[in-house]
Image (tube, rainbow, N blue to C red):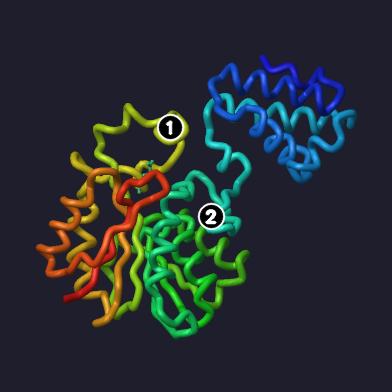
Amino acid sequence: MIDLLAQATLDAALAEATRLLSAAGVDGARLEARLLAGHALGIDADAVIGRPGRRLAPEEAARLAGVVRRRIDREPIAYILGEREFWSLPFGVNDAVLIPRPDSETLVGAALDLTRDRQAPMRILDLGTGSGCLLLSVLSELPNARGVGVDISARALTVARDNARRLGLGGRAGFVQGDWAGALTGEFDLILANPPYLAETELHALAPEISRFEPPVALFAGADGLACYRVLIPALTRLLAKAGTAFLEIGAGQAAPVAGLARNAGLNLSMARKDLAGIDRCLVLRRP
Ligand code: GLN
């Protein structure tokens, strides 16, 4: 049982939280203890270490014990804090959405690099928007662009809409519920998608934070991980404007099969972009 309640000072509570998190197999336990303490006390995580002798009120100690207990149960820290930074922007998250990953910033970087005129009035589509991180990050850099985010999950759309509002992008971002592009019409200059791409057989190999807490609907795509590409790639041919570009996130080893699906749908692979680990992470597709 966690004995944080018995700790009178913040530094003692921090040391105990670090020890407990570390014993539970959490990497970076010290930093996480500080983040959780900041969250429980309603102060900046940096301020936590500035006042080691600060005494914890009983309700603060109880709140800290509560969040440490959740983290020991391996709930992702982003869900506990309710936030994750992506493209240097704060995104609200809960268990309805995939936690934004640094890998996905590859798509944002590629989309911006290939946009010649950042002042142009572009139309953007984000398929499987989740937290809205792809769409909203790109919109934050393209002041005259407007975008639509589609997701099958109504709870995810609530998160995405809240994020749009919090980031001051609500006026240029719309969100609709849909099964990929099924109900969509129109043409888009820029299409982004980070669909689920894990094979169902990969479940057992995932960290508990992912396998037990993140939404399976955002992670898994059939027996080979390619099921969603088979649905959404053919729709791209209809939704891409003539000179439009699509940016698709892919998993490790999927460049060849996904490029094959694109070719079969009549799209050209214009390039692949690697993530920071050197893995092909983003396919850039165009109409011929
Ligand atoms: N990149 C995620 C992971 O490795 C998978 C997300 C996805 O399927 N789009 O857990």
Residue 120 point in image, percent of width and height = 45, 85
Name the residue tied to disc 2: 86
Query: Which of labels 1 and 2 is toward the front?
Result: 2
Kindly indicate the quadrant of the structure image that contains residue 24: top right
Name the residue tied to disc 1: 212
Q: Earlier in the sequence, mark 1 or mark 2?
A: 2
Does 264 sit left or right of 43 as displayed? left
Name above or below for residue 40 compared with residue 230. Answer: above
Residue 58 point in image, percent of width and height = 84, 28
Q: Which residue is rendered at x = 21% and y = 63% of the image?
A: 233
Q: Amino acid at mark 1?
A: Arg
Does 177 sit left or right of 170 as displayed? left
Rounded to the nearest angstrom, the CA distance separating label 1 from label 2 is 22 Å
Q: Which residue is rendered at x = 36% and y = 48% of the image?
A: 218
Residue 118 point in image, percent of width and height = 47, 79
Disc 1, SS:
loop
Mark seen at residue 230: none
Q: Give the farthest residue toward the left.
A: 264
Kindly indicate the quadrant of the structure image that contains residue 77: top right
Does 48 sit left or right of 170 as displayed? right
Residue 41 point in image, percent of width and height = 78, 39
Q: Residues within 10 Å of mark 1 (few under 14, many from 20)?
A: some
Does 50 sit left or right of 230 as displayed? right
Q: Which residue is rendered at x = 68% and y = 35% of the image?
A: 36
Q: Amino acid at mark 2?
A: Phe
Whether residue 77 is visible: yes
Q: Where is ligand 1, by quadrant?
A: top left
Q: Give the farthest residue toward the top.
A: 1
Q: Nearer the viewer, residue 132 or 263?
A: 263
Q: Residues within 10 Å of mark 2 (few under 14, many from 20)?
A: some
Whether residue 96 is visible: no
